[in-house]
Image (cartoon, rainbow, N blue to C red):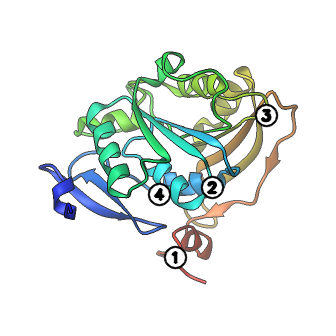
């Protein structure tokens, strides 16, 4: 039987992925997951038996959380970077979730070559937030590609979701609040009507940092703006965030 160390390659770490007590393989000096996938999975409504796709899955955090916390029948994580895709596959095997989770090494801009149209009931995305020449560029190539639109911009993610979803299918995305107008406009152009919106603030009294949005393919207009999500009270997580991580009361 393989020990935890047998799953690792040089420069990698084995970390706990909460909630659920899962373990995830990450590169010590490369891309490491943030809170955003946890927020997105908590926001998404996954139906029992759904076929789900995560576009730009990175190290596979979203598929792992959905496999642990929902009754989705199958979950595909699409990732273009070979090293990240390999790490995600090993993480899936380490957690014995390969019967439900598949990691597909593919450029999401070529998703039509890999997956049939209307083959998923739900699509999620945590796209890179920054355009190629904007913001602080990470010295790590892995981190830079995860944060900047090098292998596909916002419109590419949304077009990919529209291809995969049937009428009525659901799209969930976490994105920068400052690019909300662009996000909603691009979704509507692709036929993914925004239906739910929740702004994410670090603390009360501060501007929104992120937004969580649900879109429905082919739906009529009508957007529900939900109560804000606050991440911290002082220096501690709020009760709602603690609950997302399976902690607190």
Q: Are marks 3 and 4 in contact (CB under 8 Å)?
A: no
> Looking at the picture, does residue 14 appear above or below residue 137?
below
The residue to which callout 3 is attached is: 168
Marked residue nearer the N-terminal end (1 or 4): 4
Q: Are marks 2 and 3 in contact (CB under 8 Å)?
A: no
Marked residue nearer the N-terminal end (4 or 2): 4
**Residue at the spot x=57%, y=69% of the render?**
241
The residue to which callout 4 is attached is: 35
Question: What's the distance in space between the residues labelled 3 and 4, CA to CA?
Answer: 28 Å
Q: Quadrant of the C terminus?
A: bottom right
Q: Position of residue 220 (x, y in %)?
A: 88, 31
Residue 135 visible in the current orientation: no
Q: Residues within 10 Å of mark 3 (few under 14, many from 20)?
A: some
Q: Which mark is residue 71?
A: 2
Question: What's the distance in space between the residues labelled 1 and 4, CA to CA?
Answer: 17 Å
Question: What's the distance in space between the residues labelled 1 and 3, CA to CA?
Answer: 40 Å
Marked residue nearer the N-terminal end (3 or 4): 4
The residue to which callout 1 is attached is: 234
Marked residue nearer the N-terminal end (1 or 3): 3
Left or right, residue 60 beside residue 153? left
Marked residue nearer the N-terminal end (2 or 3): 2
Q: Quadrant of residue 106?
A: top left
Of labels 2 and 3, the one closer to you: 2
Marked residue nearer the N-terminal end (1 or 2): 2
Q: Position of residue 202 (x, y in %)?
A: 55, 62
Left or right, residue 131 beside residue 158? left
Q: Nearer the viewer, residue 173 or 182?
A: 173
């Amino acid at each position: 039987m393989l020990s935890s160390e047998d799953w690792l390659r040089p420069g990698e770490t084995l970390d706990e992925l909460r909630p659920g007590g899962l373990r995830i393989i990450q590169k010590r000096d490369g891309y490491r997951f943030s809170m955003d996938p946890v927020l997105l999975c908590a926001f998404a409504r996954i139906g029992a038996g759904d076929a789900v796709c995560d576009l730009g899955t990175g190290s596979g955090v979203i598929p792992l959380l959905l496999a642990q916390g929902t009754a989705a029948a199958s979950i595909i994580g699409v990732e273009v970077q070979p090293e990240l895709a390999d790490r995600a596959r090993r993480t899936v095997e380490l957690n014995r979730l390969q019967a439900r989770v598949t990691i597909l090494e593919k450029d999401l801009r070529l998703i039509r070559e890999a997956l049939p149209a209307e083959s998923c009931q739900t699509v999620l995305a945590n796209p890179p937030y920054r355009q190629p020449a904007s913001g602080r560029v990470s010295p790590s190539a892995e981190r830079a590609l995860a944060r900047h639109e090098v292998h596909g911009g916002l419109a590419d993610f949304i077009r990919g979701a529209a291809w995969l979803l049937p009428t009525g299918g659901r799209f969930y995305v976490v994105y920068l609040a400052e690019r909300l107008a662009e996000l909603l406009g691009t979704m509507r152009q692709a036929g993914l009507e925004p239906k739910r919106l929740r702004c994410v603030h670090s603390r009360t009294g501060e501007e929104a940092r992120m937004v969580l949005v649900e879109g429905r393919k082919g739906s009529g207009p009508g957007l529900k703006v939900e109560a804000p999500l606050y991440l911290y009270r002082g220096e501690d997580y709020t009760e709602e965030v603690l609950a997302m991580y399976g902690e607190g009361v």
